[in-house]
Image (cartoon, rainbow, N blue to C red):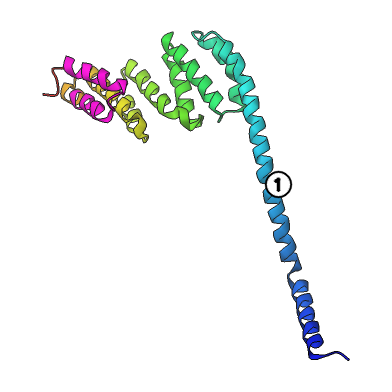
């Protein structure tokens, strides 16, 4: 004969079975989702590693191309930029092309490549791309565009450089008081060992000091 304990045990088993019948699909679904999420995470790691390796391999021809030849650099970088546009290597290649183009006087090509880095490149390269793009605008005497480009900087690590370059734009326009103020700000933002400090001080002194 079964005792009270046996009846209670059977009731609990019956309740558990009922609960399982009502909720098994939810439980199984949660388990499957967890498995898929874990597999996806591992798969993403694997895919990211493979993409990085491929981008590094495609950068090799760029690193071997003549650094002063924007056309050859662009040809070498074509597959890299097409297949891995958001990679560190792609934006590094674009910066190299822009420098070669700028040095050769092809400001339109330099501007195009630097604008691309700002829109599509790696975060690590956007600060320097912004400064170089402002330099292109300054060379073209597009002063308003240069200032707007510098104003878009949000990275305090580039604060001294941005202020110094703003001074250059103001100087080019003959706005001497504003140029002095910008160079003074660059000095304040630059640390004692930052080479920007000495450069800005030299420019400021050439304008007669802070006054």
Relative depth, front residue between 173 and 84: 84
Above or below 56: residue 15: below
Q: Is residue 193 inside the magenta stretch? A: yes
Q: Position of residue 89 (x, y in %)?
A: 55, 24
Does dot 1 land on a helix, a strand or a loop?
helix
Q: Label 1: few (<14), some or many (≥20) within 10 Å?
A: few
Q: Nearer the viewer, residue 37 or 14?
A: 14
Q: Which residue is mark 1?
A: 39
Residue drawn at point x = 45 percent, y = 26 percent: 115
Residue 63's x, y, as percent?
56, 14
Q: Quadrant of the N terminus?
A: bottom right
Residue 169 shown left or right of residue 21 in the figure: left
Q: Quadrant of residue 3?
A: bottom right
Residues in magenta, as a range: 180-206
State the residue at coordinates (13%, 17%).
208
Asked whether the viewer can see residue 20, the reply is yes
Q: Is residue 58 above or below residue 26?
A: above
Q: Which residue is at 78% across, 73% downward?
A: 21
Q: Position of residue 174 (x, y in %)?
A: 19, 19
Residue at horizontal 65 percent and vertical 45 percent from the top: 41
Relative to the observer, which residue lies in front, 51 or 129? Answer: 51
Q: Quadrant of residue 196?
A: top left
Residue 115 is inside the magenta segment: no
Q: Is residue 152 visible?
A: no
Q: Residue furthest right?
A: 1
Helix, strand or loop: magenta stretch: helix
């Amino acid at each position: 004969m079964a005792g009270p304990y046996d009846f209670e045990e059977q009731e609990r088993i019956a309740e558990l079975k009922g609960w399982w019948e009502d909720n098994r699909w939810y439980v199984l679904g949660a388990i499957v989702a967890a498995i898929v999420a874990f597999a996806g995470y591992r798969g993403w790691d694997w895919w990211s590693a493979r993409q990085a390796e491929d981008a590094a391999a495609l950068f090799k021809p760029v690193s071997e191309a003549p650094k002063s030849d924007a056309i050859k650099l662009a040809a070498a970088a074509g597959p890299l930029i097409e297949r891995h546009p958001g990679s560190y290597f792609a934006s590094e290649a674009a910066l190299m092309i822009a420098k070669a183009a700028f040095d050769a006087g092809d400001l339109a090509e330099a501007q195009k490549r630097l604008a691309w880095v700002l829109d599509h490149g790696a975060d690590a390269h956007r600060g320097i791309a912004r400064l170089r793009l402002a330099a292109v605008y300054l060379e073209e005497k597009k002063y308003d565009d240069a200032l707007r480009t510098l104003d878009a900087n949000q990275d305090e690590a580039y604060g001294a450089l941005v202020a110094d370059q703003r001074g250059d734009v103001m100087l080019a326009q003959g706005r001497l008081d504003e140029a002095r103020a910008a160079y003074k700000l660059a000095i304040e933002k630059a640390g004692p060992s930052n080479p920007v400090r000495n450069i800005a001080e030299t420019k400021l002194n050439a304008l007669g000091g802070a006054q």
